[in-house]
Amino acid sequence: MNADPQSQTTPQDHNPVSVGKTSRRLLLLYLLVAFFGILLLSANVAAIRYVRSDWTLHLTLMLLGAATSIIALIGIRKEHSRMRRKIEESMEQRQRLLSDLGTLQTEFDSQLDAHCDDLELDQSDRQRIRYALHTEESRFRDLCDKLPVMIFETDADGRMTYVNQIALDSFGYTEADAAGGVVFTRLFAEADVARVSANVARIMRGQPRIGCSEYRARRKDGSEFDMTIDSALVLKDGRPVGLRGFAVDLTAKRAAEQERREQKEFLQQLVDMLPSGVTYKIPNGRFLLCNEAFCNFVGLPRDRVLGSVVGDFTDPATADNYESLDRQLLEGNDSCGDAIIPHDTPHGTRWFHCRKVLLRAADGTPRGIIGSYNDITEQRAAEETLRRSHELLQKVVGTAPLPIIS
């Protein structure tokens, strides 16, 4: 607040203490002068009464003393008036300052109340945001703990800053161990540590990701298992601060693969014991399975048959017979699954009784064709011999001179 220009004086004039000190000094000076004048006047009156000296000198001194006293009294009155005026001006200035201070205090109180309201609102908002963040974090952690894969996060030094529960269970660590900051490379077998360190350094340099990589992991108790990892760089303000990714324990997958291999070997041994040729082909005609008898029929080793089509090892006419039968089965004509087909082999032309069944998926789409092949060449030869013998017998009977009773 700016004061009235007429009241703008020096700081010393605005200070009542300073004004009082100056006025007291002047009043004291004027009182001393008045006392001196009265003393001089009294001394001259006494001198005129008792000393009887030259009255002119005494009269002059009396007039001088009276004048001095009068001047001192006038000065005292004037200084008193000035002091009173200064005090009144100081009081008025003080009242104005108090008034301005009251206005400022009112404005400050109103602004403070407004800020307090804003702070209360901000505090409430912060509490809501903090609660929402805590809720979302709890949901995120709960979601991560329920995932069937291991989720992890590391800092720039390779120390674990977060792992989900399945990761702790897979490696045999506790939450206290994880809170201590497990070094990333401690989780791998010695043979893979160098490769892991090189890949981590490459990712931290910002080089492109190479996808999932398989490693040999090491648990806390020293046991090992296979796992696959995919990780990405974590950036903060444009600079790398760590890695974030997931890992999958391959133990169950390896066990399933081993079981499937054993089942496939068992199935192969089983079909190899059958005297009939057995095959399985997918709808495009490529063989995925065949037994030893079928390989003997076509005169080829198994690795030559698997992955090939029938046209790769038979003549076009025979291949067309087989493919025509397959097409009719795929089109839904199940009555075409039985046929006798001649087949050229290294042992000459052989006749096969072929039976085929279409295998369908759960939704009804064709998955493949299972076929069995029986070599009926000797059977056909025996039947042909029997037919010819029967014809010869009929001719003999027809030309005999005497009737023959059978």
Image (tube, helix red, strand yellow):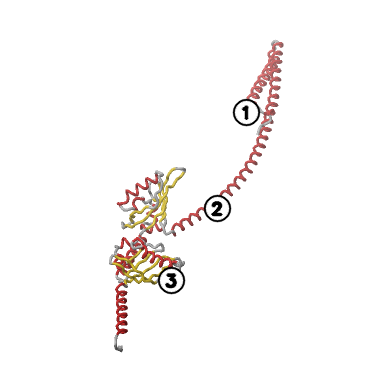
Q: Is residue 23 left or right of residue 393?
A: right
How far is mark 3 from mark 2, CA to CA?
68 Å
For the residues bearing labels 3 and 2, Cβ distance under 8 angstroms: no
Helix or strand or loop: what does disc 2 sit on?
Answer: helix
Image quadrant where one finds the N terminus: top right
Q: Nearer the viewer, residue 284 or 366?
A: 284
Q: Is residue 107 left or right of residue 136?
A: right
Looking at marks 1 and 3 on the same chain, the residue that comes earlier in the sequence is marked by: 1
Number of the label disc, if any, that sits on residue 11: 1
The outermost residue toward the front is 401
Q: Residues within 10 Å of mark 1 (few under 14, many from 20)?
A: few
Q: Name the residue type under label 2.
A: Arg
- Name above or below for residue 18 compared with residue 65: below
Helix or strand or loop: what does disc 3 sit on?
Answer: helix
Q: Which residue is drawn at 31% across and 56% down?
A: 222
Number of the label disc, if any, that sits on residue 128: 2
Looking at marks 3 and 2 on the same chain, the residue that comes earlier in the sequence is marked by: 2
Number of the label disc, if any, that sits on residue 82: none
Looking at marks 2 and 1 on the same chain, the residue that comes earlier in the sequence is marked by: 1
Q: Position of residue 397 (x, y in %)?
A: 30, 84
Q: Name the residue type under label 3.
A: Asp
Helix or strand or loop: what does disc 1 sit on?
Answer: helix
Is there any visible trace of residue 43 in the rendered image?
A: yes
Is there any visible trace of residue 49 in the rendered image?
A: no
Q: In which quarter of the image is residue 85?
A: top right
The outermost residue toward the left is 347
Number of the label disc, if any, that sits on residue 334: 3
Q: Name the residue type under label 1.
A: Pro
- Name above or below for residue 75 compared with residue 345: above
Q: Residues within 10 Å of mark 2 (few under 14, many from 20)?
A: few
Image quadrant where one finds the C terminus: bottom left
